[in-house]
Image: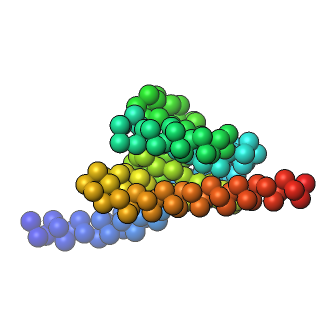
Amino acid sequence: MFAILALISPILIVLLLVFIPVGACGVLLVRLRLRWLIATQWRSKGIRYLVAYSDNEQWKDYFEREVLPALGSSVCTINLSQEGGGKRRADLGWRLYRHVGVRRDRYPVVCRVTRRGGWEVIRFYQAFLAARKGRSVPLERAKAVLASWIRSDTLLSKAQNTSS
C-alpha cells in the first residue's frame, strides 16, 4: 500500500501544481469579464445596484417598500421566490448574483456597482436573523450602510447633473 502511495504522490503533486493555477486563472478571468460587462452594459444604462431577495415575510416588505423605491431606476432586481433559477444564465444581474451570492448568506443581498465595474456587497440574512432574536444592531448597521450608499450616489448624480 505504501509503495503505491509513493508512486502516485509525485503525480498528484504535479497535477495539483498544474490545476490550482489554472483554476485560479479561470476564476480571475470570470471576474474580469463580469467587471467588463457591468462597466459596459449597466453603467451606460445607469444601473448601479443589484437587489436579490425573496418573498420571505421577514424582509419582503422592507425591500419592496423602502429599498427598491429609494433606488429607483438604478436597480436590477431578482426576486428568488418568483424567478428562482428561471432567469437566463446570460442575464447580467443573474450572473453577478451567482458570483457574489452563492457562497454564504445568499439572500437578501444588495450589490453596489463601483465606478470601475467592481462591486460592494451588503448581506442582510444574518442581520435579519439577529433582529428576529431581539438583536437589532446588525440590521440597523446594514440599513445604515445601504442608506449611506444611496446618499452618496444621490449626491454624486446631482453633482454630475449640475456640471453637465
Task: Mark yes or no: residue 140 visible.
Answer: yes
Please indicate, yes or no, whether residue 22 appears anywhere in the rendered image.
Answer: no
Residue drawn at (32%, 69%) of the image: 13
Estimate the x, y position of residue 11 in percent, counting from the top left.
30, 65
Indicate whether 47 appears above or below 54: below
Question: What's the residue at 51%, 61% (across, down)?
Answer: 144
Q: How is the image coloured?
A: rainbow
Number of disc labels: 0
Q: From the top left corner, tell me how far across and down residue 89 is, in percent.
A: 52, 35
Place of residue 42 in the rendered image (x, y in percent of width and height, measured from the top left): 69, 45
Quarter of the C terminus within the rendering: bottom right
In terms of image quadrants, where is residue 77?
Answer: top right
- Tell me which corner region of the image, top left, top right, bottom left or bottom right, holds residue 113: bottom right
Give whichever of 155, 17 is nearer the camera: 155
In this picture, residue 1 sits left or right of residue 98: left
Instruction: Tell me where residue 68 appears, x and y as whole percent.
Output: 57, 41
**Residue 123 position by quadrant:** bottom left
User: Is 105 placed above or below 3 here?
Assistant: above
Judged from this view, the residue extending furthest toward the left is 1
Q: Nearer the viewer, residue 116 or 155?
A: 155
Which quarter of the rendered picture does the N terminus lie within? bottom left
| Apparent side of residue 115 relative to residue 64 in the rendered image (left or right) | right
Residue drawn at (89%, 59%), measured in percent from left and top? 163
Position above or below: 99 against 76:
below
* Outermost residue toward the right in this view: 164
